[in-house]
Image (spheres, rainbow, N blue to C red):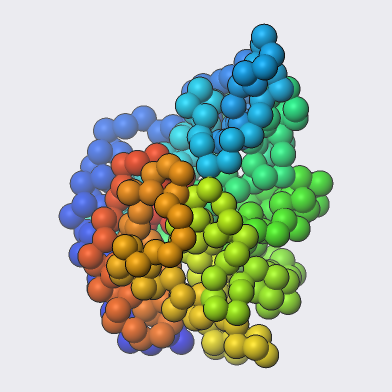
Amino acid sequence: MKFFGRYLNSALSVEAKQKDDIVKRAEAALLTEPPHITDSSSPDSAGGRHDYFSQADYSWRNPDTPDGLPFVNRDGESYPGAFFEHRKALRSMRSGTANLTAAYLFTRDAKYAKAAVRWLKEFFLDRETMMNPHLLYGQAVLGVCTGRGIGIIDTIHLMDVPVAADILFENGQMDKDIYDGLKGWFAEYLNWICTHKYGLDEMNTKNNHTVCWHAQAAVFAKFTGNCDVLQMCADNYKNIILPNQMAQDGSFPLELRRTKPYCYAIFVIDNMATLCYILSTAENNLWEFTLPDGRGIKKGLDYLYPYLYNKSSWTYKDDIAYHDEWPVAMSFMLFAAAAYGEDKWLELYDALPKYSANDEVRRNTAIRVPYLWL
C-alpha cells in the first residue's frame, strides 16, 4: 500500500524482528509432509473425499436423546469431540506456506519457495489431494444440517494464500501454469460464495460473519482481478457493515453481547482492519472514511486500544473460555500503525505474544504472517 509511505516501512521493520522465528518454522515445514484434506475423513460428512467438512464449534451432543441428536448449541463453548481435522489441515497448509514464503523473502533461498509451491499445488490442484472449491459441508450441525453458510468463516485462513502466491510468482519462484491454476481455484471459490445460498446467507449476516465474508471476498477478488466484487465489498463496508455494526462509541454491540465479548471484540476489529487494508486506495481510503456521525475504523480502533494495552480495564464480563489467552499480536495493529503513523500500535504489537499455540486463538487469527502483507 504505497500511499502509507514511511509508516508502512516502520510496520515492516517491527514485523521483520520475527525473522528468526519465521525461518525456524519454515525449517520445520521443510521436514513435514504437506497437509491435505484428503488425509482424513469423517463418517458424519455428507460430502466426498475432496470436500471440506467441519462441525459447528458450539454444537454439542444432545443430553436428552439416546443418540445425542440433534446436536444443541452452547454458545462460546467449543465441543471437544467435533471433527476439525480438515480445518486443521487447511490452517496448517496456510501457516506452512506463509512461513516458507516469508523465509524465502528473508533469505532468498529457493528451497523455501520450492516447498511453498509444492504445498499449494498439492492442496489446491493435484487430483489426488486437492480440496474442491466450495464449502457445502462447513460447520455442519449433526442431526440438523449437513452444512451452513456460517461455515464459510472457516476459510478466513485462506487469506494468506493469494498473497503468498503473488510473491512467489512475481519473484520467479512459481511456474505460470501453477499460478494460473491457483487463480482458477480461487475464482471458482469466489463465485461459489457470491452465488450459492450459503454464501449469500453468510454475506448478509449481521455480525462478524459478514465482515469475514467480505474480507475473504476482497482478498480473493484482488487475486483474481474481479473488480466488481472489490467494488461491492467497498460499497458494502461503507453502506452496510459500518453503519449497522459499529456503535457511536466505536464498539461492536453484536460482539459484546456474546459469551466471549473480549475475543470477539478483537476478532471483528481485526477483520474490519483487514478489509480497510485490502480495499483502500489513494483515491478511496477507507482508513479515513467516516459516516456523517463520525463512525469509522479509527473510532473502532481507538475504542479497543485501552483494553488491549491494559486488559484489567475491560468493563464487560470475562469470556466464558480462554479469556486469559488474549490479547496477542495481530496484523491489524501493524495495519493501524501504517495507516495512522501511531507508534502506540507498533509498541503494542511488539509487546504481545506473537505465535500462540492455543487452538482457540489460532482459530480466531486470520492472518498468520503479516510480513507477507507489508
Give the left or right position of residue 188, taking residue 28 as reference: right
Closer to us: 68 or 361: 68
Task: Work out whether 92 lies above or below 239.
Answer: above
Q: Position of residue 341 (x, y in %)?
A: 35, 86
Q: Position of residue 314 (x, y in %)?
A: 39, 64
Q: Residue at x 56, y 20 (%)?
A: 41
- Does residue 61 appear in this view? yes
Q: Position of residue 268 (x, y in %)?
A: 53, 61
The image quarter in which residue 339 lies: bottom left
Q: Residue at x 71, y 52 (%)?
A: 202
Task: Work out whether 115 lies above or below 79.
Answer: below
- Does residue 335 appear in this view? no
Task: Work out whether 270 lies above or below 54.
Answer: below
Quarter of the figure with the C terminus: bottom left
Q: Residue furthest left?
A: 20
Task: Work out whether 193 lies above or below 346.
Answer: above
Q: Residue at x 72, y 44 (%)?
A: 149
Q: Position of residue 131 (x, y in %)?
A: 59, 35
Q: Residue at x 66, y 29 (%)?
A: 72
